[in-house]
Amino acid sequence: MVDRVETAAPTVRPLGQGGARWQIHDRHLGYIFIAPALIFMLAVVFLPVANTIATSFTQMNFRERVTEFVALENYGRLLGDRLFWLSLKNTMVFAIGSTIGHVVLGTLFAVLLSARWAPPRIRNIVRGLLILPWLFSLAAAALIWGLLYDPFGPLNYLLMVTGIAPDSFDFLGEPSNAMVSLIVINVWKFYPFYMVMILGGLQSIPEELYEAGRLDGANPLRLFWHITLPMLRPVLVAATTIDMITTFATFDLVKIMTNGGPQRATQTLSLYIYETGFRDVNLGYGAAMAMAMLVTLTVATALYIKLVVRRPSGGEGGNAAF
Amino acid sequence: MLPSNRERIALIVCVVIVTFVTLFPVIWMIFAAIRPTAETLAFPPVWIPREITFQAFADLFANPGELKYFANSYIIALATAGLTILLAAPCAYGFSRFRIRGSTALLLGILALQMLPTVALILPFFSMARALGIYNTHLGLVLADTAFTLPIGIWLLKGFFDSIPSALEEAAMIDGGTRLQALLLIIVPLALPGIVSTGVFAFLWSWNEFLFALILTSGDGAAPLTIRMSQFFTQYGRDWNGIMALNVVASIPLVVFFVFIQRWVVSGLTGGAVK
């Protein structure tokens, strides 16, 4: 995709006296086309990031109402801040738990959808229905699951009648349950995206491989294990990376449903940054935390882009239609 | 290879279970919207609604305070979609058709931007919005949202422009047309599905956005629906009937765009171009 930029330059030059003018014109025209978007991003993304970097080296002195330069003091404070490490741990648990859920369910359901149990039209409809949760906002999902998790809700009832929870099950109020309850919502909300992505990968596996496997007498489980999974590897790596990066910054669910509680059991990094900046009005420390998060994610993104660029064209993500 | 009948039945049973479990939360939301809260919270649960009422919807549409959130959400999401198309389309066209120094690096930089966590920008966004006098305005949220829909829009549209042969506009230009004419009369109509998809994507992103709305609005001035939804948990007395009616109405744009989404999600744009 990236290579095409070079070859897509105008190759035909109009003949005659206008030719030279067109050429000069065209050479600059490209920059004119891309300028507005790039200037916008410069103003709305890079400037704020630069501002965050600068702020992270300062500390507001409320008594004298001045902002002081404190060099790396904020970063030093991070290292000894137990709440920061707890937030980081919770964030990792949330991100890893969600990612495992997404990739495992995504793979299983993608395989299920690509099996020929019905004509493609019907399977397309089912796929469409399964995408539904992905469309909702996390705020809407929080409401929906807030009702399901209610003490008088259907899930608590099911856990009680099946004897899994002898007493009422407290989904969000009990520290040991809250994180898992949030991960379940996140898995429900985002697995369809990864399912569709993996479905695209499944489509690019040549049917001959399965035929050869069957001739050798392999059962479906072995076919899955020895052909499907290895062939899906690039898609699964990409999905895992995107997922880890995006869930790492999760905020909405935690803020709306638990506000980090109970007893900080669901306190995540992004919530801590928000609270430091907007509740404690400690801009310098909040900025330092945001930078720590940004650097972590930049490294992860760099790794991801390396994967994307190396990926052979036309492979993963191709056409997920049946 | 087609599965045997026995395998087919087993597969269908699995599909039915998966679909039911995935859709149950949505069904439960709709049920709660059309029956009294008392029945929703009955224990043991009433699985099929008995007393059906649309009073909550009537109350919702008669309440100007609630409708304001809807208006705000529509204004912000539509404006974000418009601004995203306006900025992304020329940019994507430029990258697709012209030799631009460092274009590979620029495009990868743009790809990296979509991985940027929104929380990393909330502190400067808040002070910038305050300084520019656009705190608690639609404009402030539109600018913030576009910062995150633009990178994806550029990548989406560049893919579309790349798939349109440049010979088409070259032919038009050889025939005496200007590049602008070629662009507006030939390329834009051909790229329309991509442009619409980008708009739909930006609309939905903005419609569902919560964090920027939380830090850039206060009170009900410009606050969108996600803010209204988030306040439910801090309220006394939970009117599930009312909030789920609101949730159902708020989901209507999602369902309307569902057809677009379907085609767009599956047309290979999941290969890293979209979160």
Image: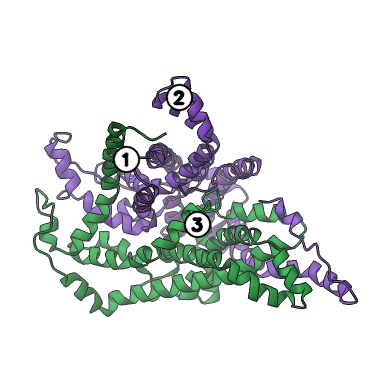
* Subunit that carries the residue with mark 2: A
Relative side of A262 to A236, left or right: left
User: Do residues under tags 1 and 2 come within 8 Å of each other at their CB atoms?
Assistant: no
- What amino acid is labelled 2 in the image? Arg
State the SS at label 3.
Answer: helix
Spot the purple chain and give its letter: A
Graded by Cα atoms within 10 Å as few (under 14), some (14 to 19) or many (20 or more), the crowding at tag 1 reads some
Closer to viewer: mark 1 or mark 2: 2
Measured in 3D between alpha carbons, the distance from the residue under mark 3 to the one under mark 1, in whole angstroms, is 24 Å
Q: Is residue B152 above or below residue A269?
A: below
Q: Considering depth in this image, is A165 or B205 the residue closer to the camera?
A: B205
State the SS at label 1.
Answer: helix
State the SS at label 2.
Answer: helix
Relative side of B126 to B235, left or right: right
- What amino acid is labelled 1 in the image? Val
Q: Is residue A194 above or below residue B38?
A: above
* Subunit that carries the residue with mark 3: B
The residue pinned by badge 2 equals: A214
Residue under disc 2 on the same chain as residue under disc 3: no
Res. A88 visible in picture: yes
Relative side of B187 to B78, left or right: right
The residue pinned by badge 1 equals: A180
Residue A295 location in percent, x, y?
59, 46
Graded by Cα atoms within 10 Å as few (under 14), some (14 to 19) or many (20 or more), the crowding at tag 3 reads some
Q: Residue at (64%, 41%) from the top-left corner?
A: A312
Spot the green chain and give its letter: B
Q: Residue at (22%, 50%) from the top-left corner?
A: A148
The residue pinned by badge 3 equals: B118
* Subunit that carries the residue with mark 1: A
Q: Is residue A232 above or below residue B128?
A: above
Res. A80 visible in picture: no
Q: Residue furthest top?
A: A216
